[in-house]
């Protein structure tokens, strides 16, 4: 049987797909990227916000069309949409053959075997806590970098977020399990590991009664073939001196922090079930930059949260100007069924949310361009991601940029480079938000 995968949403979901792919491959299923010549397609979905749900449904309907045309035989829906809307999917899209909740990821071989045998309209929905966290996987990222998921679920319960209700409470892997996987990845040629969880900075609290991310970074530092360790999804309340000191002393740990802030107004943050205000968040950012002077900060903000006044939005704009965050994304608030914020009676119109998002990103664009241009004349470490024969140049990422979300570095070199090489590049220009440079000896 040939199986194709469509993996949507966040890197954590991608890791889940990689685990399922490994199980199927080990069981004798043939994994194929050609969706036009497969027997079963597995769509690993996201359901975080409306746009993610729409993307998932569009992909399912595309596969339904291919099934009707005889190009594929069976459709299996997995992931967060399947966990959240299991019965609705079968009811609204009866062409789907099985809906697999997150807790059944470890049973994907049995599920597909049953589907191939003709069992239809099958809903498999064990407890989400049954979802495996540390199974073997086949990477779908390039060979030289990989995500390393250290935990799943979330216990923060922000009032706008469905993740705790979909993926359950926060669950950490053991330090031994994480380090063992990191060593195996490095032995297999991975140079850059990107540490992820819904809240990476909470890592270890549930197992050990204390935050263990600093200790984990110390252990990752000792892995011989590993070159870079990058952190994503660090909750602002849990950025401690212990963590910053660990980042400072471990040379492989990049001074790159993804810090989802969501807002800066005290009242809005309180309604989000988060803490802090403009002054405390600016103080945190300044403290990080004091401890790590070359730190690159990435964040996300939400505009149009219920009750957000013009004055509160203006405060957010002033915060963006003062904070000068290096990489910043913006979401328009999405009212998600089952969340407390969706019941608030002071919802804001889509038109206002869109307008505020554009204003905020225009402010950030000027900051981003200025910061990017400040790299001209500098020599940066860059990992090589590939070669473009048309322009006879290589492309990759400076240490300041995470894959798939940040800028690209385009570089020339008078000798051959290979994917995964880490080289020094002198930056001499910026074009369309990307760094342009040449490799130096």
Image: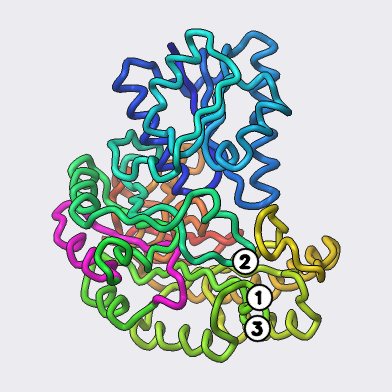
Magenta residues (range): 211-238
- The residue wearing badge 2 is 159
What color scheme is it? rainbow
Looking at the rendering, in which quadrant would you find the N terminus?
top left
Up-down relation of residue 154 to residue 243 (above or below):
above
The numbered mark at residue 271 is 1
Query: Do labels 1 and 2 touch, CB within 8 Å?
Result: yes
Q: Residue 98's x, y, as percent?
A: 56, 23
Q: Residues within 10 Å of mark 3 (few under 14, many from 20)?
A: many
Mark 2 Cα within 10 Å, few/some/many (few <14, many 20+)?
some
Foreground disc of the pair 1, 3: 1
Residue 34 is labelled as: none
- On the picture, is 246 further left or further right than 310? left
Whether residue 234 appears in magenta in the rendering, the answer is yes
Q: Earlier in the sequence, mark 1 or mark 2?
A: 2
Residue 135 left/right relative to 370 = left
Crowd class of label 1 (few under 14; some 14 to 19; many from 20; radius 10 Å): some
Return the mark for residue 265: 3
Callout 3: SS: loop
User: Which x, y percent locates residue 310?
Assistant: 81, 81
Which residue shows up at 81% across the image and 71% down it? 346
| Residue under the point 32% across and 63% down | 206
Residue visible at 42% across and 40% down?
Answer: 16
């Amino acid at each position: 049987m040939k199986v194709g995968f469509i993996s949507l949403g966040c890197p954590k979901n991608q890791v889940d797909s990689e685990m399922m792919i490994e199980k199927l491959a080990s069981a004798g299923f043939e994994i194929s990227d050609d969706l036009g010549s497969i027997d079963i397609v597995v769509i690993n979905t996201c359901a975080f916000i409306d746009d993610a749900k729409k993307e998932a449904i569009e992909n399912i309907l595309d596969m339904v069309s291919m099934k009707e045309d005889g190009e594929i035989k069976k459709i299996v829906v997995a992931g967060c949409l399947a966990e959240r809307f299991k019965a609705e999917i079968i009811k609204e899209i009866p062409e789907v053959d099985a809906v697999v909740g997150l807790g059944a990821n470890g049973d994907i071989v049995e599920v597909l075997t049953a589907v191939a045998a003709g069992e239809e309209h099958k809903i498999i929905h064990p407890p989400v806590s049954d979802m495996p966290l540390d199974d073997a996987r086949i990477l779908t990222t390039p060979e030289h970098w990989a995500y390393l998921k250290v935990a799943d679920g979330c216990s923060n319960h922000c009032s706008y977020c469905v993740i705790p209700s979909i993926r359950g409470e926060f669950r950490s892997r053991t330090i031994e399990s994480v380090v063992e996987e990191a060593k195996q990845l490095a032995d297999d040629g991975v140079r850059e590991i990107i540490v992820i969880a819904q809240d990476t900075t909470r890592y270890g609290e549930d197992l050990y009664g204390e935050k263990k991310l600093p200790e984990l970074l110390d252990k990752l530092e000792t892995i011989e073939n590993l070159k870079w360790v990058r952190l994503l999804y660090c909750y602002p309340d849990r950025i401690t001196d212990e963590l910053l000191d660990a980042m400072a002393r471990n040379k492989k740990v990049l001074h790159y922090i993804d810090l989802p802030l969501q807002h800066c107004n005290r009242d809005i943050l309180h309604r989000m079930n988060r803490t802090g205000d403009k002054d405390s968040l600016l103080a945190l950012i300044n403290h990080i930059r004091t401890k790590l002077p070359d730190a690159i900060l990435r964040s996300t903000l939400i505009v149009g949260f219920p009750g957000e006044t013009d004055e509160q939005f203006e405060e957010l704009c002033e915060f963006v100007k003062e904070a000068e965050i290096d990489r910043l994304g913006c979401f328009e608030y999405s009212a998600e069924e089952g969340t407390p914020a969706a019941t608030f009676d002071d919802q804001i119109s889509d038109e206002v949310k869109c307008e505020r998002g554009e204003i905020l990103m225009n402010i950030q664009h000027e900051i981003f361009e200025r910061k990017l241009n400040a790299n001209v004349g500098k020599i940066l470490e860059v990992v090589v991601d590939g070669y473009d024969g048309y322009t006879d140049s290589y492309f990759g990422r400076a240490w300041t940029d995470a894959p798939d979300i940040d800028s690209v570095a385009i570089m020339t070199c008078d000798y051959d480079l290979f994917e995964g090489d880490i080289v020094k590049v002198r930056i001499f220009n910026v074009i369309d938000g990307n760094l342009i440079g040449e490799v130096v000896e």
